[in-house]
Each structure stands twice: as structure tokens, then as C-alpha cells.
Amino acid sequence: MSRWLKPVVGLPGISPREICAAVTDAVQRDQDIVQLLRSGRPDAAFERLLDRYERKIFRLCCSLLRERAQAEDAAQESLLRIWKALPGFDGRASLSTWIYTIARNRCYTAIERRRESESLSDEAVAVEADAAADRHWLDLLAHPCTRFSPHVVPHPPDAIAIDIA
């Protein structure tokens, strides 16, 4: 085989057999939780899941969000979603994969919300809004109907009206 066509399997220094063993261990480790779910005991399953995954979910959220307060919120929201969805877990993926996917998606949602709020609070947006309001009042004052009658034009919100009789 040429050096350009080497197969890419696994991680450097870790054999495919070791990867398979690690995945098998993860699935077997969560079998107790899955058995509790199958026996109709979702509360006990969630308690065991909390003991095993709560800190891991929080660390995942910290690594993605890079802000402790947001990570705490995302982890809490993730656990709530896991609690609500746990009775419907169907086992198509390993339990840990399912849990981390929920947590990761909550973090992505938090990142998107942060971007939206940052773009809304951008100083350039505020400056543009002020300029648009100024243009509105200037257009109103320049309109032919209001040019000759100052009583028709309402005062801008920050203007002081002085009545000279």
C-alpha cells in the first residue's frame, strides 16, 4: 500500500480493538439505568443517571460555553430535558451518546441566543435607531402640510415646548 493511501482507523496510539472495548464498556456501564427504565422505574433510573452524568454534563457545557453561569443554566436545562425524555429512550444510541447530544444541543442553543442578544445590543444598532428617529422628525418637519402650521407637528419625545403668546 502506498504511503498516501494508509487507512485511517481509530486514534493515534489506540488500536481499533481498544476503541471497541471502550464503547462496549460504556454501553455495559449504562445497562443498569436501561434496565431500570425497562422495568418501569424512571425515577430510580434518573437518580442513577444524575449520580453518573451530572458533573460530566456540566463540564461539557463549560467547555462549549466558556462561561460558568451559562454552563450552569445549560446543564440544568439539559437535565430537565433528559428527565422529560428518559421514559422514551429507545436505545438506538448508547445512553451516554443520547445524554451528551441533548446537552450539546442545549449549549448550541445558548450560543445562538448569546449571538442574537449581542447583535441586538450592538452600539451601531443603537446609533442607527437614533439616526432613523431623527430622520423621521426632520421628514415630518419638512413635509409641505406641516411647514406653515407648527401646531400640526407633534413635539419629539425629548423636546420642550414653549408657548409664546
Image (spheres, rainbow, N blue to C red):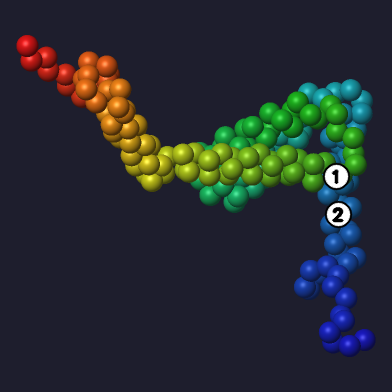
Number of dots carrying numbers? 2
The reply to whether dot 1 and dot 2 touch (C-beta < 8 Å) is yes
- Amino acid on which disc 1 is placed: Ser
The label number, if any, that marks residue 17 in the structure image? none
The residue located at (85%, 44%) in the rendering is 94
Relative placement, left or right, of 146 versus 116 is left
Q: Is residue 81 among what the camera can see?
A: yes
Question: Which residue, as the protein is rendered here, is positioned at the far top?
Answer: 165
Secondary structure at badge 2 equals helix
Residue named by callout 2: 23
Asked which quadrant contains residue 122, the reply is top left
The label number, if any, that marks residue 94 in the structure image? 1
Q: Nearer the viewer, residue 35 or 127?
A: 127
Relative placement, left or right, of 19 versus 116 is right
The residue located at (90%, 42%) in the rendering is 92
- CA–CA distance between discs 1 and 2? 9 Å
Q: Nearer the viewer, mark 1 or mark 2?
A: 1
- Please determine whether, in this image, residue 109 is positioned above or below residue 12: above
Report x, y in % for residue 56.
67, 45
Q: Quadrant of the C terminus?
A: top left
- Amino acid on which disc 2 is placed: Val
Q: Quadrant of the N terminus?
A: bottom right
Asked which quadrant contains residue 74, the reply is top right
Q: Is residue 68 among what the camera can see?
A: no
Report x, y in % for residue 15.
86, 70
Relative placement, left or right, of 50 versus 37 is left
Mark 2 nearby-residue class (10 Å; few <14, some 14–19, many ≥20): few
Report x, y in % for residue 48.
76, 33
Secondary structure at badge 1 equals loop
